[in-house]
Amino acid sequence: MTISASAVSDGRSSREGPPARDDICFVAGQRESIMWHQRTIRFWLICLVVACVLPVTLAAGFLIVHSYRQNTAFVGHSTVATARALIQAVDAEMYGVQSALQALATSPHLSSGNLEGFYGQAREALTVLTGTNIVLTDPAAQQVLNSLRPFGAPLPRHGQPDVVRRILETGDPVISDLFRGPVVDNWVFVVEVPVLADGKIIYTLAMGITPDRLSGILRRQNIPPSWVAAIFDSTGTIVARTHAADQFVGKKGAAEFVQRFTEVAEGSIETTTVEGIPIFSSFSRSPRSGWTVGMGIPLADLTANARQSIAFNAATAGTMLAIGCLAAAMFGARISRSIMRLSAPALALGSPGLPSIPVTDIIEIDEVGQALVRASQLIALREHERVQREADTREAVVAKQVAEQANRAKSEFLASMSHELRTPLGAISGFAQLLHGAGDALARDRRIRYTENIMTASEHLEHIINDILDMARLETGHVKLDLETLDCLEIMTEASRTLELQARKSGIVFTVDTSANLPLVTADRTRLIQVLLNLGSNAIKYNIPGGWVQLSAIPVGSMVRFIVRDTGPGIPAALRGQIFQPFNRLGAELTQVEGTGIGLALSRRLVLAMNGRIDFESTEGEGSKFWVDLPAADEIAATSAKVATPLPPTTPLARNTVLYIEDKIPNVELMHGVVENAGGIRLLDAQTVKDGIAIARSVKPDLVITDIHLSNGTGFDVLQSLREDPATAHIPIVALTADAMQANMNNMKRVGFDEILTKPFKVVELVNLLRTRLPNEPNPLKADC
Ligand code: ADP
């Protein structure tokens, strides 16, 4: 069964929404894995079982061994006590016999020498003493009488002459070791006492006792049948035995055991019986007789209990281990399975959606599962926050870029606008100063030309300002259009006048195709001309030296298409989308081509406002084709194009020669006006850097005045070329620029321009400059002109 993560989450917390940071507790740690430590849970559980069972088993084993030892010690004590009791019983038996013999030794028959009488007395005593025989021996160890033989019958010597000798030496009774009695012809031992007469030992009196009599003592003890009890004489010879007495009486006991009981009076030893049975044997030796009683318990009996306990313990431990290991394996497998069931949800962490957590019967694993759910929620939350942050950052970056771009575009626009404004303003200001300075002295034709120049420049200035204002109005949607029915050819002809002039100055061939039969169009006359002028002007500006531009128009459906073709460098496909953006000059701002970057944007808005379309095609390196579609009106008209009139030439000869390099015709006109007014100065002009340098090298003028931003180069190029050439290096060079920024002016000064004048210049300043810089100039100019 599974429950959804959210259900688990809800069950745990009553709070709504994603978990807070405090709700989540991560146990972070880097697991340093040592390969040999890595085992399954099952393995560790089995280790746990072994760790639990093994000490218990070892403790039980220890207790068993301890108990065995204690038991053995106890058995040792009790069997030693039994052996002691037995040897005391044996001693008592001997002592009884000894006492009886000592009483018999005091018989008057012996002191009177009536041996026959004593013989009878001895035989009578035997019936009470239950001995084998009674023997009287003289000090020479010769038997004197033996109750087993008729009185007077020949007798052998004493079977144990040593016993006789000891009695003679000590005067004390002696108990012999076991020997084979010569008369009895059987295993026998004797209790022998001295017979005294007048304080002297005259005989020894002995009673022979067979081992049977002692066997009775052992039997009476009722020892367990598997136990062995034996009586040994002082030499370690078996005198009596509970088991196989016939076989072993008269034989030596086990050497190890005999050795032991000759060393100590009492004790226990693990040894083997004469039959070779391992036994635990206790013994007690009589200090009087030197005899020993031994009690042997087969080790098999003694260790039976311990072995049983050990076997039981081992069996129990083994069973416990087996059951424990089995249980551990089962539980281990169960835990493993439960843990493994978390793998999939754990792997699914971070993927969209909450993982489904299985319910297990292990609380801790369930808690881990719930932690996974919360971790998943936290990851989702963090992911969401991260995405949000990234989006915010992206937006902020984009907004910043847009703002920066707009800022840059605005700055560039302001820079270009200022430049564009300065050019016509310079012309207006300059010609106005000329008119003012010359007063009535100025020839009429010149006055007219100056005035026209002022008017043209004013118009240009007005156009620029209007463009900017249009742009601003279009931005806010406040443009007033005067839509009327227009003759296309007439419009094209009017636009051509301006364009042709511009093309000529730029060395571009300009043509107008007026051959098509075109319908009238509905448009705002001024705006349409403005658009065509913009397209045509661009086609001239962005062209190649010697290139051409064509203006044409064709009917396209219900529209008239005005087309401007050029042979310029074309527009890269990558920049296609940016061309109608306001202030975007597609990199042209880095070139010498002047512009504001608003022409096309403005044109597009105007065309759209006139219900038309504007678009273009362009192939890099080949040229561009811009067109404007406008709705056709009903009337049809055709008009031939008119061609613009060229500018009138000037330049009188004079003593000093000044070369003016400038590509803007009004500025050139103004300079001519100033110089003509001054008189005596020949003014040469060039519109490109190349031409300027060429003229300077061939004519070697007295002064060069150059604009900074020129077609195909700059005033800096002029400066550098003339300075590098020794023939022209000495010629003073004046920079006349509209760029009035202090930094740029400093730069011009630094690179070596002799003077810097800013546009619009003051005529008086220029005249003063000419006066100072021209060597042959006899001060013909008036300082206040
Ligand atoms: P500008 O004042 O810079 O000419 P426009 O809005 O008229 O501004 O034109 C925008 C830009 O489009 C120009 O700066 C120029 O890079 C490019 N462009 C316009 N017309 C042409 C053309 N005929 N050939 C190549 N590039 C052109």
Image (cartoon, grey):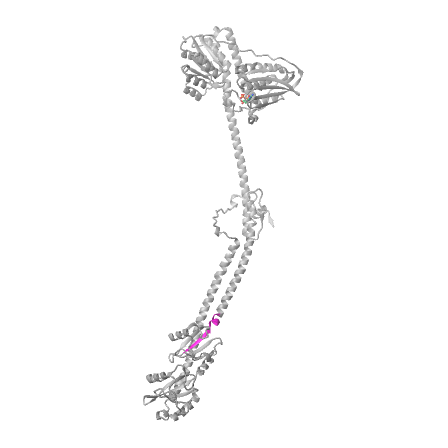
201 part of magenta stretch = no
294 part of magenta stretch = yes
Rendered position, 624 above or below 37: above
Q: Specify whether residue 535 is in view.
A: yes
Quadrant location, the C terminus = top left
Q: Nearer the viewer, residue 392 or 20?
A: 392
Residue 423: percent from the left, percent from the top? 50, 16
Q: Specify whether residue 13 is in view.
A: no
Rendered position, 144 above or below 632: below
Q: Nearer the viewer, residue 757 or 78?
A: 78
Residue 79: percent from the left, percent from the top? 44, 75
Q: Which residues are magenta?
A: 292-303
Which of the 4 quarters of the picture holds residue 523?
top right
Which of the 4 quarters of the picture holds residue 178?
bottom left
Residue 634: percent from the left, percent from the top? 67, 17
Quarter of the image where ligand 1 sits: top right
